[in-house]
Image (cartoon, rainbow, N blue to C red):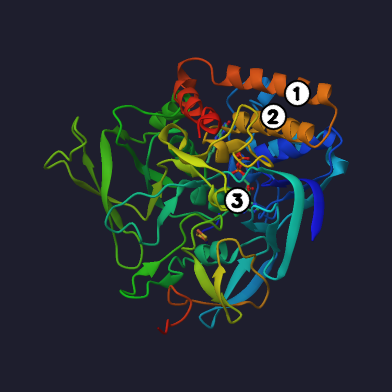
Amino acid sequence: MVKTQLLVVGGGPAGLAAADTAASLGIQVLLVDEGRSLGGQLVKQTHKFFGSGEHHAGVRGIDIPQLLLKEGQDKITFKLNTTVIGCYQDRVLTALTGEDEYFKISPQAAIFATGASEKFLAFPGNDLPGVYGAGAVQTLMNQYGVLPGNRVLMVGAGNIGIIVSYQLLQAGVQVAAVVEAAPQIGGYLVHASKLARAGVPILTRHTILAARGKEAVESAVIARLDDNWQVVPGSQQELEVDVVCLAVGLSPVVDLLRQAGCRTRYVPELGGDVPVRDSLLRTSQEWIYVAGDVAGVEEASAAMVEGRLAGAAAAKQLGADVAAADEIIARSQASLKALRGGPVGEKIRSGIAKLEGGIANA
Amino acid sequence: MRRITKHPILQFEEKPVITFTFEGRKLQGREGDTIASALHANGIKVLSHSRRYHRPRGFFCAIGKCSACLMTVNGTPNVRACVEPLVEGMDVRRQPATGGELKW
Ligand SMILES: Cc1cc2nc3c(=O)[nH]c(=O)nc-3n(C[C@H](O)[C@H](O)[C@H](O)COP(=O)(O)OP(=O)(O)OC[C@H]3O[C@@H](n4cnc5c(N)ncnc54)[C@H](O)[C@@H]3O)c2cc1C
Ligand code: FES
C-alpha cells in the first residue's frame, strides 16, 4: 500500500497545476498518469494558445507543461505509465504500472483530473478503419509524426475540428471539406479563415450520412440539412477520402468517480455526465476533488485555474496554512469568473450553476 | 513512406529503426512508435476483425480509452496497440475482437 497525503490522478494541465499548488503549500503529492509523458492533451497541440497571457496564451501547447511546475516540484512524486483502475469508498485506489506492477494507494484526499474522451457519431460504416477521433489524428501526426491518410473529411467545425484541419494541412494532408450540422461555425474565426484561405470548404448545415469502403474508408457521403435538421433530398454528394475525422465534442471521463460513489448529473452544456461539486470543486465524496475537463469540458486555461483551486482547497483540508490556501482559492475563483465572463462563457456558466447546487439539494 | 518529413512547427528527426513482425511478416518501425503508429506508417490500418461479421477494425481514439485497437502481442491477447510502445523483435498479430473464441 502506497501512502500519500494527496493523490492527483492525471497529469494534464489541470493535474499538473493541482499538484504544483498543493505541493507549494507543503503537501506531499503523488501524481500518476497513464501516459509516458506529462501534459495530457497539451502535448499534441502545436498551435499557439488563445486566451490571456496569465494563462500562457501565445505559447504553444507542447511547451506548457514545463511552465506549470514551478514551486512544488520536489514535493511531488511522479509515477508515469500508471493507470488508476479502481477507486473505492474506503479511500483505497488500485493502480497498474505497465502490464504487471499492480498496487494500492491510500491517500488522505484525491484530485481527479482525468480529462475527457471523444464522442462518437452513429452512421453506417462508422466502424471502418480510417474513421478516427480528432484527438487520434492529432496524436498520430504531432506525437508520432505519422500521416493519418491522404485526404480527410472533417466532421465538426468547433474549435477542435477547425484546428485539427489546419494541422492536417500543415502536415501536408488534404482536407476535402469540413462539415458542420449547425448553421454557423463554432470555432474561433481566426483559425477558420486560415482554412478558408487555403481553399478548404467549410459546409455548415451539412452532415455525414455514411462512410464507405471495403477494408478501410474509401469515400464518405455528405448531405445538406434543412432548418429541421432533416436531409435535403438530392443534396447527397460522395467525397473521395481515406480518413473521416470526428470532432463532435468530448465528454468527461467519470467512471472512476462513479465507482467511488460521487454523484453525477447530466449537463449537456458541460459535455454529458459531470460530477456534482461545490464551488471548491469538491464532489459529493468529501475526500475527492475534480479539476479540468473531467469537471466539465472547457479549455486548457480553465483547466489550469481549476487545478490551482482544487489543489489549494484540498491542501487546506489536509491542514496546510489556511491564509495561504484561502488566498489562492480567492484568486482562482476570481480568475475563473473572468475566464467565463461575457457571452462566450454563457453556456459554461449555466452548466455549472446546475452542478454547484447539486450537493446542497441532494 | 507515410511519415511526416517536413513540418512548419514540429521537427521529426530520423529515429533509429525497430524491427518487428506483423502476422509473421517483418516490418520496420521507429523508436518512439507505438504498435499502431508503426503499423499505420506501414500502411496497415486493419488491426482486428469483428467477431460475428468479421468487419475490419482499426484504432479510433489513439489514447488507450476505447478498446478499438486490441491485438495479440507476444502471445498476450487484448494489448492496446495504440499506446503500447513498439519493442525490437515484437510479435504482433490480429485477433478476433474478443481476443479469442468465447465458449459459453
Ligand atoms: C485539438 C484541440 C485543441 C485545443 N486547443 C486549445 C487551445 O488553444 N486553448 C485552450 O485553452 N484549450 C485548448 N484545448 C483544450 C485543452 O487541451 C483541454 O481542455 C485540456 O487539456 C484539459 O486538461 P485536463 O488536465 O483536464 O485533461 P487532459 O489534458 O485530457 O489530461 C488528462 C490526463 O489524465 C490522464 N488519465 C486519465 N485517466 C487516467 C487514469 N485512470 N489513470 C491515470 N491517468 C489517467 C491522461 O493520460 C491525461 O494525461 C484543445 C483541445 C484539443 C483536443
Ligand atoms: S484506439 Fe482507443 S484504445 Fe486504442
In the image, residue B50 above or below residue A240: below
In the picture, measured across the screen, residue B56 lies left or right of residue A304, that is left
- Considering only vertical position in the picture, is A115 above or below B62? above
Distance in Å between CA atoms under marks 2 and 1: 7 Å
Image spot of residue B29 (x, y percent): 61, 67
**Residue A106 in the image: x percent, y percent?**
76, 54
Amino acid marked by disc 3: Ala
Q: Determine whether, in the image, residue A148 is placed left or right of residue A230.
A: right
What chain does badge 1 belong to?
A
- Label of residue A328 in the image: 1
Chain letter, disc 3 residue: A
Q: Position of residue A40 (x, y in %)?
A: 63, 45
The mark lying in front, picked from 1 and 3, is 3
**Amino acid carrying mark 1 in the image:** Ile
Q: Name the N-terminal-most of marks 1 and 3.
A: 3
Q: Is residue A59 visible?
A: no
Disc 3 element:
loop
Distance between the Cα atoms at labels 3 and 2?
Answer: 22 Å
Label 3 crowd bin: few (<14), some (14–19), many (20+), radius 10 Å: some
Count neighbours of disc 1 (C-alpha within 10 A) and say few if under 14, some if 14 to 19, many if 20 or more: some
The crowding category of the residue bearing disc 2, from other C-alpha atoms within 10 Å (few below 14, some 14 to 19, many at least 20), is: many
Residue A309 has which mark?
A: 2
Quote the CA–CA distance across marks 1 and 3. 28 Å
Q: Quadrant of residue B74?
A: bottom right
Dot 3 or dot 2: first in sequence order is 3
Q: Chain for mark 2?
A: A
Asked if labels 2 and 3 touch by Cβ distance under 8 angstroms, the answer is: no
Q: Residue at x 81, y 49 (%)?
A: A4
Instruction: Label 1: state its secondary structure.
Output: helix
Mark 2–mark 1 CB contact (< 8 Å):
yes
Image mark for residue A260? 3
Label 2: state its secondary structure: helix
